[in-house]
């Protein structure tokens, strides 16, 4: 990696190819990038910090990373009011998986409903939060953290791209790739719903065929369905999981 890995506007804006990332709101340190977006901003606005002091994950969890090691970003979307916001976690997770895969050259998967997995470790997470007619799609990608930088008390073991392939990389090109894929996938979702991204999503389904536990029951993962639910086979009976957390056997 060249010295001076930076996500400053001067470094990233020249890499942007579409309408996502405009405006590009960058602060070195913030509480949470989710708080830097507001309803007065246009769709495609991106808030980004090198350090979050109150980064948050799903289900009330925190999200931490040493300064300058990760991508910590929130994208403003304004989907039609009749659309299902939780599907955006899958749309964004698929985009992040595609972009990482382009840079790493290893298969990257999506663990329903919002985790991005590489070598059975979670390397990225998505948090889609709706308020005031906008959706803040939070994206956290573990890029250059050392193993000792990663949290240990997480339901799914955490990894960074560096702990997995030993390569320190510039975050800017990866961020630009994520925004490019996300724009393509978001437009496809606007037009056709999850069907629009299903080829990529379905082929990256981490839980498919695994022994899993959810809501106190054990079963075998069948698939993410086209409505964004997860289908589990419990003793030969298929059940649809609408929300929550699915644990998998190692
Ligand atoms: C999860 O896996 O639980 C979701 C993690 C989302 C983390 C990102 S980092 C950027 C944005 N700001 C936050 O406070 N959270 C999201």
Image (spheres, rainbow, N blue to C red):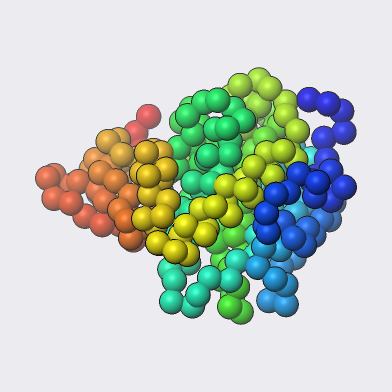
Q: Position of residue 21 (x, y in %)?
A: 72, 56
Residue most extreme to the left: 236
Q: Position of residue 183 (x, y in %)?
A: 58, 54
Q: Residue at x 49, y 46 (%)?
A: 94
When asked about the image quadrant of residue 30, the answer is: bottom right
Say if residue 203 shows up in the picture.
Answer: yes
Q: Residue at x 62, y 30 (%)?
A: 103
When asked about the image quadrant of residue 27, the answer is: bottom right
Q: Is residue 161 above or below residue 17?
A: above
Name the side, left or right, on which 189 lies relative to 40.
Answer: left
Of residues 116 and 192, which is closer to you in this image?
192
Q: Position of residue 130 (x, y in %)?
A: 56, 71
Query: Which image quadrant: the C terminus?
Result: top left
Residue most extreme to the top: 166
Of residues 25 and 36, which is closer to you in this image?
25
What is the count of numbered marks?
0
Say if residue 229 shows up in the picture.
Answer: no
When asked about the image quadrant of residue 39, the answer is: bottom right
Query: Which image quadrant: the N terminus?
Result: top right
Of residues 250 and 18, which is closer to you in this image?
18
Name the side, left or right, on which 226 lies relative to 170.
Answer: left
Q: Residue at x 34, y 33 (%)?
A: 249
Q: Is residue 192 above or below residue 199?
A: below
Of residues 61 and 81, which is closer to you in this image?
81
Q: Position of residue 68 (x, y in %)?
A: 79, 40
Q: Residue at x 75, y 65 (%)?
A: 36
């Amino acid at each position: 990696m060249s010295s001076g890995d930076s996500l400053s506007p001067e470094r990233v804006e020249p890499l942007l190819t579409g309408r996502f990332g405009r405006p590009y709101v960058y602060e070195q340190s913030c509480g949470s990038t989710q708080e830097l977006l507001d309803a007065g901003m246009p769709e495609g606005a991106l808030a980004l910090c090198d350090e979050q002091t109150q980064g948050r994950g799903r289900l009330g969890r925190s999200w931490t990373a040493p300064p300058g090691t990760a991508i910590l970003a929130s994208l403003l979307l304004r989907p039609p009011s009749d659309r299902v916001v939780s599907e955006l976690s899958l749309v964004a997770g698929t985009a992040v998986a595609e972009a990482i895969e382009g840079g790493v050259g290893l298969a990257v998967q999506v663990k329903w409903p919002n985790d991005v997995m590489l070598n059975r470790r979670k390397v990225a997470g998505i948090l889609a939060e709706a308020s005031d007619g906008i959706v803040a799609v939070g994206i956290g990608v573990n890029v250059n953290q050392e193993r000792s930088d990663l949290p240990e008390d997480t339901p799914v073991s955490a990894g960074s791209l560096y702990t997995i392939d030993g390569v320190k990389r510039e975050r800017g090109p990866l961020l630009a790739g994520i925004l490019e894929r996300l724009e393509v996938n978001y437009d496809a979702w606007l037009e056709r719903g999850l069907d629009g991204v299903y080829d990529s999503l379905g082929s990256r389904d981490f839980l498919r065929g695994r022994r899993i536990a959810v809501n106190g029951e054990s079963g075998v993962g069948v698939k993410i369905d086209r409505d964004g639910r997860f289908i589990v086979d419990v003793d030969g009976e298929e059940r649809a999981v609408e929300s929550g957390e699915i644990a998998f056997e190692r």
